[in-house]
Image: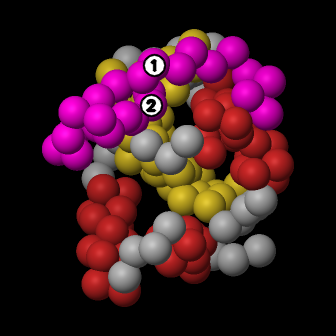
Amino acid sequence: MANAVEIIQQSMTQQGYDLETTQKVLAGVATLVSKPGAKLVNLGNSVFLVLVKGVGEVEVHTFSAETPQALARNFVDLSKYLKNIGVKVARTYSDDRRFLQIAKMTGLPVKINELQAPGKGPEAVSYEYVMEM
């Protein structure tokens, strides 16, 4: 199993990001987790950046070097962890359509909202995934 930095680097590379962008993301993640209300949760070869947005509400950003099936299992484990620490609502966002299938594979009660992707033109779609625990 890789460490969080290696997983984030692998995830960014697999998504086609260059080294400079990857380094900026790593620096941003490091800055965020040095503050209260942000935590990295490492499950398998996935890293979840969990940001507290309010009482009982978090936003999750995912970095993964897993197969879709393994990532779905990691999301299930993350949901158990979040529920155990008192989270009532978890949200994440993605414009990657593969996450639609992964959300279904989890078997979790995820509500999916289609949104216009910010700054990408009227045809670009993004998805918000909301899970109430």
Classify residue 7 as left or right of residue 81: left
Q: Is residue 92 above or below residue 132?
A: below
The image shows residue 45 at horizontal and vertical percentages of: 71, 65
> At label 1, which amino acid type do we have?
Asn
The local crowd at label 1, few if under 14, some if 14 to 19, many if 20 or more residues have their Cα within 10 Å, is few
| Figure quadrant of the C terminus | top right
- Residue at the bottom extreme? 19
> At label 2, which amino acid type do we have?
Tyr
Secondary element type, mark 2? strand
Classify residue 31 as left or right of residue 55: left
Closer to the camera, 113 or 6? 113
Residue occupying image coordinates x 55% and y 42%? 97
Q: Which residues are magenta?
A: 104-128
Q: Is residue 103 above or below residue 97?
A: above
Quick check: is 26 in the magenta stretch?
A: no
Q: Is residue 15 above or below residue 56?
A: below
Q: In the image, which disc is placed on residue 24?
A: none
Residue ID for mark 1: 113
| Figure quadrant of the N terminus | bottom right
Q: Is residue 28 above or below residue 103?
A: below
Closer to the camera, 91 or 120? 120
Secondary element type, mark 1? strand
Tell me if residue 83 can be seen: yes
The image shows residue 5 at horizontal and vertical percentages of: 52, 76
Q: In the image, which disc is placed on residue 127?
A: 2
Q: Are marks 2 and 1 in contact (CB under 8 Å)?
A: yes
Residue occupying image coordinates x 28% and y 65%? 28
Residue occupying image coordinates x 45% and y 19%? 113
The local crowd at label 2, few if under 14, some if 14 to 19, many if 20 or more residues have their Cα within 10 Å, is some
Tell me if residue 27 can be seen: no
